[in-house]
């Protein structure tokens, strides 16, 4: 049990630190994601091979949901890195962390489940946190734009979670990760050829390999391994530490230290997200 808890903490740490690549890499967000999903898909394919798991899907109809999910994943990660690039790691991570609130609002519509009235209260509290996080509601302000793109990242991740819940639950998590990254790569590939060609340095390529293999593929495998003995509620609590790890790392490595008003906004948003995650987990376990 202790080993599995360590696995989940390491996975969440790696996920949290992945946001820093938005600052370390100077290429556009869509090209960062293209490199990330390319190397992650290769890594997960090798994991499937060594575990001797079948790569093919049992039903040909299952490929269509994966194609759609891959597109949503590409949009999610693209908006996430773009948010960080134009603002700060803290803004990108914390606004993304609002996804449990969006999920609690959208899931009853998507799955025709009873609507929880407290979801509206959580949405209001989250909005208050975002207002505190943003210094001024000016669309030309980079922090404002970063927060809005971070919210796009949160909404798309909530949609991604719902699509996974509906369509791909009967597949292994590693296979799900492989096909999501694979189809995200194909969605982004046309943008690569349409955009002005960039010259990637060896440092850029090394960072993309590191992001794809260690901070995406390996993190995915570690998280799955941890879930073998750690219950969903505990894992959900640990997952809320993702922005905390990222913000601390950004303060140390990038010297991005939030001001007092931003700290207050982040605490409000994270508290609402933690509460929403716990309530959602309790409903699943009930």
Image (cartoon, rainbow, N blue to C red):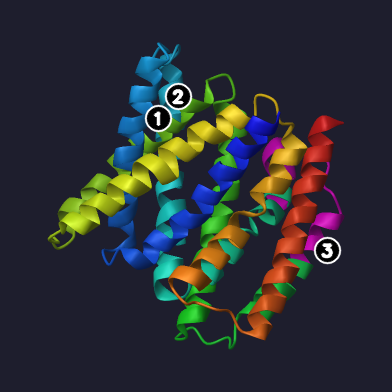
- Residue 138 position (above or below residue 77): below
First in residue order: circle 1 vs circle 3: 3
Residue 64 sits in quarter: top left
Q: Which mark is residue 121?
A: 3
Q: Position of residue 263 (x, y in %)?
A: 67, 77
Residue ID at (62%, 58%): 97
- In this view, the mark in front (2 or 3): 2
Tell me if I can see residue 56 in this picture: no
Mark 2 touches mark 1? (CB < 8 Å): yes
Q: Position of residue 268 (x, y in %)?
A: 75, 70
Q: Secondary structure at mark 3?
A: helix
First in residue order: circle 2 vs circle 3: 3
Image position of 260 (left or right of 12):
right
The answer for how far apart the CA atoms under marks 2 and 1 are is: 6 Å
Q: Residues within 10 Å of mark 2 (few under 14, many from 20)?
A: many
Question: Magenta part of the protein: which range?
Answer: 105-124
Residue sticking out furthest to the front? 2
- In this view, the mark in front (1 or 3): 1
The answer for how far apart the CA atoms under marks 2 and 3 are is: 37 Å
Q: Secondary structure at mark 2?
A: helix
Q: Which mark is residue 179?
A: 1
Q: Which mark is residue 175?
A: 2
Residue ID at (78%, 43%): 280
Residue 60 or residue 256, whichever sits in front: 256
């Amino acid at each position: 049990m202790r080993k599995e808890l360590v696995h989940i903490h390491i996975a969440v740490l790696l996920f949290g630190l992945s946001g820093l690549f938005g600052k370390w890499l100077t290429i556009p967000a869509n090209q960062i994601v293209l490199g990330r999903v390319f190397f992650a898909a290769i890594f997960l394919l090798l994991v499937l091979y060594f575990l001797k798991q079948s790569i093919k899907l049992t039903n040909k109809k299952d490929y269509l949901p994966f194609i759609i999910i891959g597109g949503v994943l590409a949009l999610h990660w693209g908006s996430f890195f773009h948010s960080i690039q134009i603002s700060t790691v803290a803004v990108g991570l914390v606004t993304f962390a609002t996804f449990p609130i969006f999920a609690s609002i959208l899931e009853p519509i998507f799955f025709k489940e009873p609507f929880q009235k407290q979801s509206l209260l959580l949405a209001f509290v989250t909005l208050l946190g975002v207002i505190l996080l943003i210094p001024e509601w000016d669309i030309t302000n980079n922090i404002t734009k970063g927060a809005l793109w971070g919210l796009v990242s949160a909404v798309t991740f909530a949609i991604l979670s719902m699509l996974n819940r509906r369509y791909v639950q009967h597949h292994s998590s590693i296979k799900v990760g492989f096909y999501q990254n694979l189809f995200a790569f194909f969605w982004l590939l046309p943008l690569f050829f349409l955009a002005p060609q960039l010259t990637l340095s060896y440092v850029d390529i090394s960072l993309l390999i590191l992001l794809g293999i260690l901070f995406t593929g390996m993190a995915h495998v570690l998280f799955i391994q941890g879930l073998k003995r750690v219950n969903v509620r505990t894992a959900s609590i640990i997952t809320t530490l993702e922005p905390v790890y990222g913000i601390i790392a950004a303060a140390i490595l990038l010297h991005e230290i939030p001001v007092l008003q931003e700290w207050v906004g982040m605490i409000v948003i994270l508290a609402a997200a933690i509460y929403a995650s716990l309530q959602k987990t309790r409903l699943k376990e009930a």
